[in-house]
Image: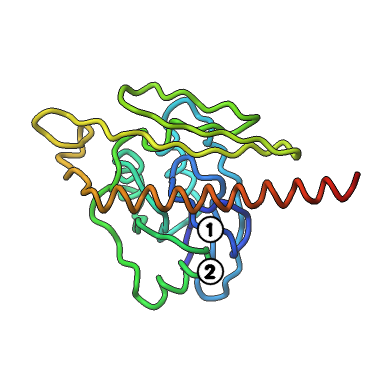
């Protein structure tokens, strides 16, 4: 079975990236042999439609299951139409996530767990956060590193549509996430950002030794 995981790095020891459409990498793994392919996400800086484009990439790879931290309505709908099972709320390393899935600890979700444009307020290069086109509150943080790889994460306050909760046309109603769910997503982002900071500090030490 081919499983796709959103990750912060290109190997099985990398952390699961809580974002889907704008994750850093996709890792495609054969669940039986653990042979994998790491693909740099080409949609990180897409002005719009990152979730749908990433979902199409996943589907085109013949993926049967997606493991990620969060998935918005547009991407979720695209993945469902392609027959890809979506599992959200996944944390830890890629290897841990695969093991949890194989032992039945992770189950497919029946609806998206974040609204559209989740994670838009982020940067991916040279310290410039991407401004969010959405109203509401966005907090972005961008960091660049010497090898030309920029990292950033953003969290955007979820917009509320009067009378319908959170939703997107064509997707029906979505329940407003609970405080616990929102805290869980923020913790996932914090863990992912911590790993990115650790990688940057490691690179700084490597460059310092080469002086």
Query: Would you name the residue on which mark 2 appears?
Result: 95
Q: Name which residue lies at 82% across and 46% down.
A: 207
- Residue 155 in the image: state x and y as whole percent: 40, 37
Q: Name which residue lies at 33% across and 42% down.
A: 72
- Does residue 42 sit above or below 1 in this rendering? above
Q: Secondary structure at mark 2?
A: helix
Q: Name which residue lies at 42% across and 32% down.
A: 139
Which residue occupies the foreground of this view, 120 or 182? 182
Say which label, 2 or 1, has the lower sequence index. 1
Q: Is residue 12 left or right of residue 162?
A: right
Residue lying furthest right: 211
- Does residue 109 sit above or below 115 in this rendering? below
Q: Secondary structure at mark 1?
A: loop
Q: Few, some or many C-alpha atoms within 10 Å of disc 2 (few <14, some 14-19, many ≥20)?
A: some
Q: Does the residue at mark 2 contact the one at mark 1 (Cβ under 8 Å)?
A: no
Residue lying furthest left: 163
- Residue 30 in the image: state x and y as whole percent: 53, 68
Q: Is residue 183 left or right of residue 31?
A: left
Q: Few, some or many C-alpha atoms within 10 Å of disc 1 (few <14, some 14-19, many ≥20)?
A: many
Q: Of the numbered discs in the image, which one, if any, rests on residue 166?
A: none
Q: Is residue 18 left or right of residue 30?
A: left
Query: Would you name the residue on which mark 1 appears?
Result: 15
- Residue 18 in the image: state x and y as whole percent: 43, 50
- Does residue 211 sit above or below 107 in this rendering? above
Q: Name which residue lies at 50% across and 26% down.
A: 130
Quadrant placement of the C terminus: top right
Front position among marks 2 and 1? 1
Separation (CA) of disc 2 from disc 1? 9 Å
Residue lying furthest bottom: 103
């Amino acid at each position: 079975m081919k499983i796709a995981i959103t990750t912060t790095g290109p190997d099985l020891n990398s952390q699961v990236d809580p974002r889907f459409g704008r994750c850093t990498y996709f890792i495609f793994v054969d669940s039986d042999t653990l042979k994998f392919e790491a693909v740099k996400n080409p949609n990180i800086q897409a002005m719009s439609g990152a979730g749908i484009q990433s979902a199409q990439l996943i589907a085109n790879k013949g993926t049967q299951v997606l493991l990620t931290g969060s998935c918005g309505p547009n991407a979720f709908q695209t993945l469902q139409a392609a027959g890809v099972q979506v599992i959200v709320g996944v944390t830890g390393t890629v290897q841990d996530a695969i093991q949890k899935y194989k032992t039945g600890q992770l189950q497919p979700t029946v609806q998206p767990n974040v609204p559209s444009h989740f994670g838009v307020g982020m940067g991916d290069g040279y310290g410039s956060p991407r401004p969010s086109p959405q109203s509401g509150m966005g907090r972005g943080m961008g960091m660049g590193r010497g090898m030309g790889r920029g990292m950033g994460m953003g969290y955007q306050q979820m917009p509320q549509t009067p009378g319908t909760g959170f939703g997107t046309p064509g997707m029906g109603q979505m329940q407003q996430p609970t405080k616990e769910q929102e805290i869980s997503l923020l913790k996932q982002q914090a863990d992912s950002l911590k790993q990115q900071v650790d990688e940057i500090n490691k690179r700084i030490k490597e460059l310092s030794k080469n002086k």
